[in-house]
Image (cartoon, rainbow, N blue to C red):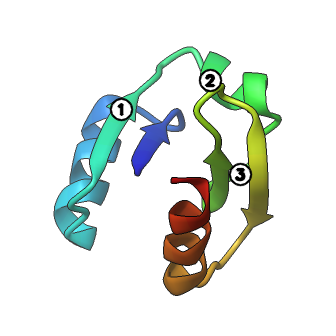
Amino acid sequence: MVGIGAQDDLAFAERFVDQTGTTFTMLWSDSSESWSHFGVRRNSTVLLLDRGGSVVEGTKGSYEPDSIVDQLAGLA
């Protein structure tokens, strides 16, 4: 799992990671190009990509972590 921050600034993203206890890899993109590429328009968007980078599943807003784990297992 990788998170991509692209809003506000790097310092804000670093505070977010500290405050939420995020343990997965977070990347920073100050250009928002990565979000544009996948059509992401807001935080809390979750996209599951296959090995080729194609979107398998996507959700905007809240998501069920167990559902993501199950879907990941199906891609293996």
Q: Secondary structure at mark 3?
A: loop
Name the residue nearer the viewer: 8 or 40: 40
Which residue, given by chain and number where applicable, does mark 3 sit on? 42
Q: Earlier in the sequence, mark 1 or mark 2?
A: 1
- Residue 18 x/y as whole percent: 17, 60
User: What is the distance, in whole Å, between disc 1 and disc 2 at their CAs?
Assistant: 10 Å
Q: Secondary structure at mark 1?
A: strand
- Residue 15 x/y as whole percent: 23, 53
Closer to the camera: disc 3 or disc 1? 1
Considering only vertical position in the picture, is 9 above or below 21? Answer: above
Find out whether the residues at labels 1 and 2 contact each other: C-beta distance under 8 Å.
yes
Tag 2: amino acid: Ser
User: What is the distance, in whole Å, between disc 3 and disc 2 at their CAs?
Assistant: 12 Å
Tag 3: amino acid: Arg
Which residue, given by chain and number where applicable, does mark 1 sit on? 27
- Residue 70 x/y as whole percent: 56, 76
Tell me if residue 66 can be seen: yes
Q: Secondary structure at mark 2?
A: helix
Considering only vertical position in the picture, is 60 above or below 17? Answer: below
Q: Is residue 47 left or right of residue 15?
A: right
Closer to the camera: disc 3 or disc 2? 2
Which residue, given by chain and number where applicable, does mark 2 sit on? 34
